[in-house]
Image (cartoon, rainbow, N blue to C red):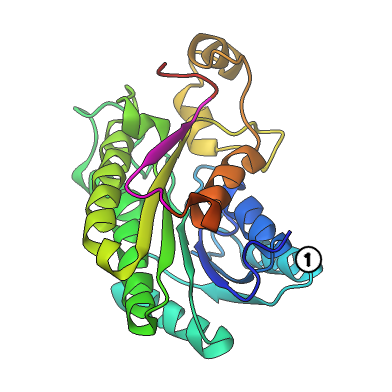
Amino acid sequence: MSDFAGKVAWVAGAARRPGIGRATAVELARRGADVACVDVVTDAPLEAESYRVSRDALDATAAAVTAEGRRALTLAVELTDPDAVEDSVAATLDAFGRVDVCCNLSGGTGPELGNGSLLALEPASWRATLDANLTAVWLGARACARRMIEAGNGGAIVSLSSSAGVAGQAGFGAFSAARAGVLRLTEVLATELAPHQIRANAVCPLGVSPAAGGGNPGLERGVARRGLDDWVRATIPLGRMQSPDETAAVVVFLASDAASFVSGQAITVAGGAHV
């Protein structure tokens, strides 16, 4: 299948847990795209959150793209830094000559990224949560859309929200607010970019299994008192957590020509939750 033959994708969050970005990058490559693999790289321990990644993890995503026979570019970028994001898109054009698909799949939860009661939350944690889960999405979309408009070939933007952005979840209030902001941002992008034939959509996953893609440590810590199995039974009608591929499939569909008349939409990938 070559839905993306000759196209280039800029994928932010390409290596972070729970693995949705990596699964998306690989599937795009499998369908013919060259991929800029972008993420926030750190040498610090990563047990408690899912926003930052190791250099090895980012390199592994790029290797998985090249194993599909496509070109890969690895870019370690602080995704809340406007200049760094703009530079990463410029580097993508320098390497590949174009950018057709923007996948904003970064973000995270954790003790320093908004977990806990809103009344007990520190302002620094609130700001960090909004920056990682909303501002970074806007910066990625803005940088890619500017280049798409210059090229005049249209394009597609797909951004990661969350089921917590569809329905607020206690203990994740800052994250819920940020991911709800992604939904409104997507609607406005779809309206403003439509004259340039650039589509914007969002996906709203719930929980990736720890056995698939490394899980989501912020989510797992947030529901620890209930127990992950009890939380799944109470929350997800299909009775299981998802794999990264199950969200990546929706991201890739929304980025493809099969969704050529879909824009401004948010697709919930949550096993029937919130029905």
Could you say which is closer to the camera, residue 120 or residue 13? 13
Quadrant location of residue 156? bottom left
Quadrant location of residue 65? bottom right
- Horizontal relation, residue 237 to residue 199: left or right: right
Q: What residue sits right under mark 1 in the picture?
A: 68
Could you say which is closer to the camera, residue 170 or residue 90? 90
Where 104 falls versus 174 (above or below)?
Answer: below
Where 18 falls versus 269 (above or below)?
Answer: below
| Residue drawn at the location 36% of the way across and 50% of the way down | 263
| Residue drawn at the location 37% of the way across and 66% of the way down | 140
Which span of residues is magenta-colored? 261-270
Query: Which element carries disc 1, helix, strand or loop?
Result: loop
| Residue drawn at the location 36% of the way across and 44% of the way down | 113
Where residue 171 sits in the image (x, y, percent)?
A: 34, 25
| Residue drawn at the location 66% of the way across and 33% of the way down | 210
Quadrant location of residue 178? top left
Check if residue 179 falls in the magenta segment. Answer: no
Where 39 falls versus 18 (above or below)?
Answer: below
Where residue 142 sits in the image (x, y, percent)?
A: 30, 68
Could you say which is closer to the camera, residue 13 or residue 203? 203
Where residue 40 sits in the image (x, y, percent)?
A: 49, 64
Check if residue 267 falls in the magenta segment. Answer: yes
Q: Quadrant of the C terminus?
A: top left
Residue 256 shows in the view? no
